[in-house]
């Protein structure tokens, strides 16, 4: 499978979602987790997905990230239609094009920061030496060059999240998916992580998509997708919202609380 993202320039559409629905057929009812979602996400964009629990935002997040399949509809990265790929091909897409940052970090407890970050590079076929060299580079970039040999239990929560970010970056992905990346962090550390993600979007051209409840995250977003009852409620640009810590006011005067 050849690279499908190198020729997509900053500001061009990178991800296309069309008529995506996710349906669960329970014994007595049919439940729509998502219904007829349409969305374009641009290269180097910072997009936040917001919605209450059960709204469908995590389902949409997982479908965009090739972690789940829609019941109907299409999801494309460039010209590549994820809904037409085999499990093996999807595994390649996840390895080559997408970096994942999880709320619980998901680091291997017995491995050092260096080895945790090197793993995806090894899975992509690199030698141990090449993988560790790449891992060292991204750990230095996120400010952890002095923590290469530390295991997760020897790192603070913010440092563990930085290791998780470095791991997401080690294969030079076009897309970073961050699931509540600041949920377990204090205010300052969370703000630092948000600033780092924004910097990656601006300086490296990475498309960042977050599923979040954190209004600090919204202040750095280019756009915010509000999802409710499995459908797109609205999509707003950052300048259309007056954001304060704990709440925000939209351009339509609606106040939402964190």
Image (spheres, rainbow, N blue to C red):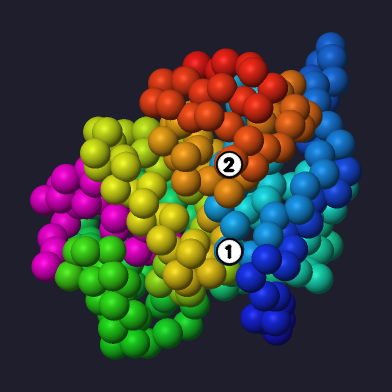
Residue 25 image offset from top left, x and y in percent: 82, 25
Q: Is residue 3 left or right of residue 118?
A: right
Residue at image point 17% right, 70% down: 145
- Tags 1 and 2 touching, CB below 8 Å: no
Q: Which residue is mark 1?
A: 44
Mark 1 Cα shell of 10 Å, populated few (<14), some (14-19), many (≥20):
many
Element under disc 2 = helix
Q: Is residue 225 magenta?
A: no
Query: Farthest top residue?
Result: 28
- Locate residue 45: give its quadrant: bottom right
238 versus 176 height, above or below: above
Q: Is residue 160 magenta?
A: yes
Residue 5 seen by the camera? no
Residue 124 image offset from top left, x and y in percent: 49, 77
Q: Is residue 46 left or right of residue 55?
A: left
Mark before the other along the chain sequence, 1 or 2: 1
Residue 248 image offset from top left, x and y in percent: 51, 23
Residue at image point 50% right, 38% down: 218
Residue 171 image offset from top left, x and y in percent: 46, 74
Residue 152 seen by the camera? yes
Q: Is residue 219 left or right of residue 114?
A: right
Q: Quadrant of the N terminus?
A: bottom right
Q: Which residue is mark 2?
A: 238
17 versus 78 height, above or below: above
Element under disc 1 = loop
Q: Is residue 76 left or right of residue 180?
A: right
Q: CA distance from mark 1 to mark 2?
A: 15 Å
Magenta span: chief secondary structure: helix
Extent of the magenta region = 146-168
199 versus 3 height, above or below: above
From the viewer's side, name the closer residue of 224 and 52.
224
């Amino acid at each position: 499978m050849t690279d499908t993202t190198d020729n997509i320039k900053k500001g061009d559409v990178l991800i296309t979602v069309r008529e995506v629905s996710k349906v669960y057929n329970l014994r007595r009812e049919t439940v729509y987790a998502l219904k007829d979602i349409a969305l374009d996400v641009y290269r180097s964009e910072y997009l936040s997905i917001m919605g209450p629990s059960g709204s469908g935002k995590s389902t949409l997040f997982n479908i965009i990230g090739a972690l789940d399949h829609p019941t109907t509809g299409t999801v494309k990265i460039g010209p590549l239609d994820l809904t037409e790929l085999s499990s093996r091909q999807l595994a390649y897409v996840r390895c080559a094009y997408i970096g994942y940052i999880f709320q619980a970090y998901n680091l291997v407890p017995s491995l050092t920061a260096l080895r945790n970050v090197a793993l995806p590079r090894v899975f992509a076929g690199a030698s141990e030496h090449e993988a560790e060299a790449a891992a060292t580079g991204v750990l230095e970039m996120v400010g952890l060059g002095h923590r290469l040999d530390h295991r997760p239990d020897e790192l603070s929560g913010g440092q563990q999240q930085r290791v998780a970010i470095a791991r997401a970056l080690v294969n030079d992905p076009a897309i970073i998916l961050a699931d509540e990346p600041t949920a377990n962090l204090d205010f300052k550390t969370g703000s630092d992580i948000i600033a780092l993600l924004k910097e990656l979007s601006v300086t490296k051209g990475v498309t960042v998509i977050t599923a979040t409840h954190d209004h600090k995250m919204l202040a750095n977003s280019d756009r915010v997708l509000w999802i409710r009852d499995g459908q797109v409620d609205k999509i707003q640009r950052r300048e259309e919202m007056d954001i304060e810590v704990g709440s925000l006011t939209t351009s339509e005067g609606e106040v939402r609380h964190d």
